Image (cartoon, grey):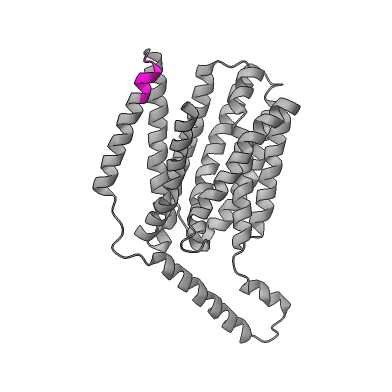
Amino acid sequence: MLGFFYASIAIFQVAHEPPKNVLIAETYYHIEWKQGFARYEAWTELGWVIGLLLGFLLVALGLNNATLLLICVCLSFISFLASAAFVTDPALIFERSLVSIEKSISLLQRGATLLSRAGFDVHAWDELKQENASALCIGLVFFSLATSIFFTPLPVFFARNLALQTSIIFILFLLNSAGCLSGYFLTQRKADNSEANTSIKKIVLLRSLLVLLPVFVGVSPFLVTIVLSITVLVAMGLAYAFYSVSVLSLSMEVIPQGKAGLFTALVGIGSAIGCFAGPLIAESFGFQHAFIASAVCFLLSFAVFRRFA
């Protein structure tokens, strides 16, 4: 019964993502997409952090699971009422169509400029290449796969290999969420759609290095272990915030209209495979091998994103 309800919640969670992304894209001008996604994700992450703190405090006060679930039901109902009252469709839905037209006109303009040049050769065709939607899709799968392989067995790694208490592990993941929240607020200050592709490649490469650091955690003194763990999780949260906003903005440009759910589906595929593969690798070959596998998947994602544009 618990598995049934958990799966049902996950289905509705996934189902709300595509219309939410389209709603944000149609509410803001194209130049403001990253700012709009960053603002939404920041408020969402803020709610997540507050929820973690409340859960920690309420458990410490002795509330049982049934009471906690009842609180969650009440909060969800409040969210439903707020959505019904304040969320409305845009008066006109044309921003994504305008972006497609702008990209087509830009391609024609570049082509005309190149044809007017003397010495038009094969190298000039590189300037006429359009964004590779397939590369973006494959990169999304590899990134979510790498993330899931790393984070799924991580609490067990902290508890089993490092003998950390549950409260300390909770605080570590809370700091990860805090780092992510900070990243979303920072993204709002520097939201440039033209730099989205470059930002994604840098962030993916950075995460491929960060996931290797826990390999050295077990051989370090306890204080160094805690500091290193905090550094990795906060940096991972910051990096993910920049990645999430950039890739959401790009997906709204590249994925055809009517196919917005493809983005969520690809992320879900990678995450599902990683949830199975991460613990399996950790249990069969050790946590270090799981972290290395995650780094390899991040590098594959980086290589694919390089082919995107």
Q: Is residue 65 magenta?
A: yes
Residue 123: give x, y in percent of width and height: 71, 75
Dominant SS type (magenta): helix
Which residue is the extreme one toward the right? 285
Residue at 63 percent of width and 38 percent of height: 274
Quadrant holding the C terminus: bottom right
Residue 152: give x, y in percent of width and height: 59, 31
The quarter of the displayed image where residue 107 is located: bottom right
Residue at 58 percent of width and 52 percent of height: 200
**Which of 304/82 is in front?**
82
Q: Is residue 98 above or below residue 238?
A: below
The quarter of the displayed image where residue 34 is located: bottom left
The answer to whether residue 132 is visible is yes
**Which of 62/45 is in front?**
62
Q: Is residue 264 magenta?
A: no
Residue at 39 percent of width and 47 percent of height: 39
Residue 97: give x, y in percent of width and height: 43, 69
**Which of 51/228 is in front?**
51
Which residue is the extreme one toward the front? 1
**Which of 280/115 is in front?**
280
Judged left or right of residue 100, residue 77 is: left
Q: Is residue 22 above or below residue 3?
A: below
Judged left or right of residue 223, residue 66 is: left
Judged left or right of residue 286, residue 104 is: left
In magenta, the rendered stretch is 63-69
The answer to whether residue 247 is visible is no
Q: How many marks?
A: 0
Residue at 62 percent of width and 85 percent of height: 115
Which residue is the extreme one toward the top? 62
Judged left or right of residue 240, residue 12 is: left
